[in-house]
Image (cartoon, grey):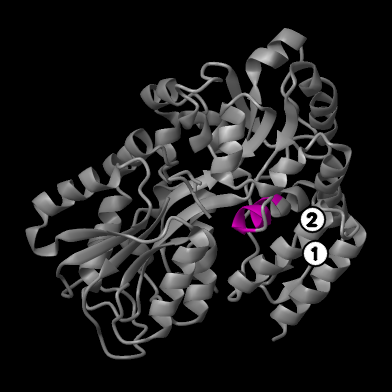
Amino acid sequence: MRWKRAAGRGLLVLAVVLTGCVSSGARAEVGGGGGRGPLTLATAGDLTGYLGPLLEGWNRTHPAERVTLVELPDSADETHAQMATDLRGGDRGRFDVLNIDVNWTSEFAAAGWIRPLPRDRFPLDSFLPPVVDTATYEGRLYAVPYVTNAGLLLYRKDILDREGVQPPRTWAELEHAARTIAPKYKLGGYAGQFLPYEGLTVNAAEAVYSAGGSILGGEGTRVTVDSAAAREGIGFLARGVREGWIPREALTYKEEESKRAFQDGRLLFLRNWPYAVVSAQGSKVAGKIGAVPLPGPHGPGKSVLGGSDLAVNTHARHPDSAARLIAYLTGEDVQRRVLTEGALPPVRAALYADPALVRRFPYLPTLRTAVLTAAPRPKSPRYDQVSLVVQAVVHDALTGHETPGRAVRRLARELDAIANR
């Protein structure tokens, strides 16, 4: 999904690519010596244009390891499809080092497409702790976190202030304001990303997690979704659509469509990635919005952890250059520019307490809290299949074709078939 770019959103998805190959089927760790040469960096739509100048800095100081920028499709689903097709081909392919969505790490590692990385080569202790888990599979590091993300609740601060209402901390408070305050201002109440694509998987997982449930366990080997918490979470969203405080138009929203609806002054509340806060500058709601953690049934909820990780293809000819580029892109100076020029949440923990950055991006402390309490999407070596099932079943619940209870039971059956395949 967009991790934006992002988000981004959240949701800019990058893929770093090297030219060259090693012996077929090799899965050795990236080592410290040799294997240097030119690189190709592919990106799924650098909408903010920050990446080119970043790479110019690398190219000036690494003339023998120059990076050429190549753009993949803007859609995360299409980016995944192109990467997977290339990697399945074996040998070298086009993509030798990849910046992958955090939920592709398990799939790519289990398939043998990416190689383990040495932990001591990267400053993992300086990253926000939850992001490191997204880069591991079966206890080994297969990637390095590059960008993180967490969903936030954006709201019309000017309207809530006028009504003397605090931003919602619970679902009940969110629902009440969406039902009673939004209509007074001819606004839709609440929206997320409810079109059946990766964004719906994220929104559904957040609702289930916030209610205290889960979807999969044990690296995707156990199905845990058939629970009262899952029925409560999916039921909350389905009830919103049925009762109208989630507009039916939201069933067509991805990140950008929902962001535009909020920026055009058509929504009171919006779940989105932090890039939507930055993008609001210059819009109809500029200076009128606030951002808080997502609410849950009885207090703050739980976001899904977004972002992307840098990984090295098993067949990369220049693994040392790959590791050096990864170290460059995750260094503190570059991570600062990722935020200031790309509007993407960095993985370096210290940047969230930097006074100058907090003044410029006031949502940083809220985002840090959201990231530290966030949970990954269900880990699975067949994640693409898992996500497609979640999207289809939850969309049927939102459109009223299935009750939340029946939807959860169907979800458990279909996920069990994937886990035991």
51 is higher (above) or lower (below) than 87: above
195 is higher (above) or lower (below) than 87: above
* Residue 199 covered by magenta stretch: yes
Quadrant position of residue 178:
top right
Which sits earlier in the primary sequence, circle 2 or circle 1? 2
Q: What segment carries the magenta color?
A: 197-203
Q: Name the main secondary structure of what is drawn in magenta.
A: helix
Quadrant position of residue 113:
bottom left
As drawn, the label of residue 225 is 1
State left or right for residue 347 relative to residue 130: left
* Residue 32 covered by magenta stretch: no
Image spot of residue 80 (x, y percent): 48, 67
State left or right for residue 256 relative to residue 98: right
Crowd rating for badge 2 (residues with CA inside 10 Å; few <14, some 14–19, many 20+)? many
Identify the secondary structure beneath mark 2: loop
Name the amino acid, label 2. Answer: Gly
* Label 2 – label 1 distance at C-alpha: 7 Å
Residues at circles 2 and 1 in contact by the CB criterion of under 8 Å: yes
Judge by depth and name the residue closer to the eye, 186 or 152.
186
Crowd rating for badge 1 (residues with CA inside 10 Å; few <14, some 14–19, many 20+)? many
Identify the secondary structure beneath mark 1: loop
State left or right for residue 184 relative to residue 50: right
As drawn, the label of residue 142 is none
71 is higher (above) or lower (below) than 113: above
Image spot of residue 241 (x, y percent): 82, 43
Q: Is residue 52 visible?
A: yes
Judge by depth and name the residue closer to the eye, 179 or 22.
179
Image spot of residue 81 (x, y percent): 48, 71
State left or right for residue 272 relative to residue 63: right
Q: Which residue is mark 2?
A: 213
Extreme residue toward the bottom, this view: 24
Q: Residue at x 59, y 70 (%)?
A: 384
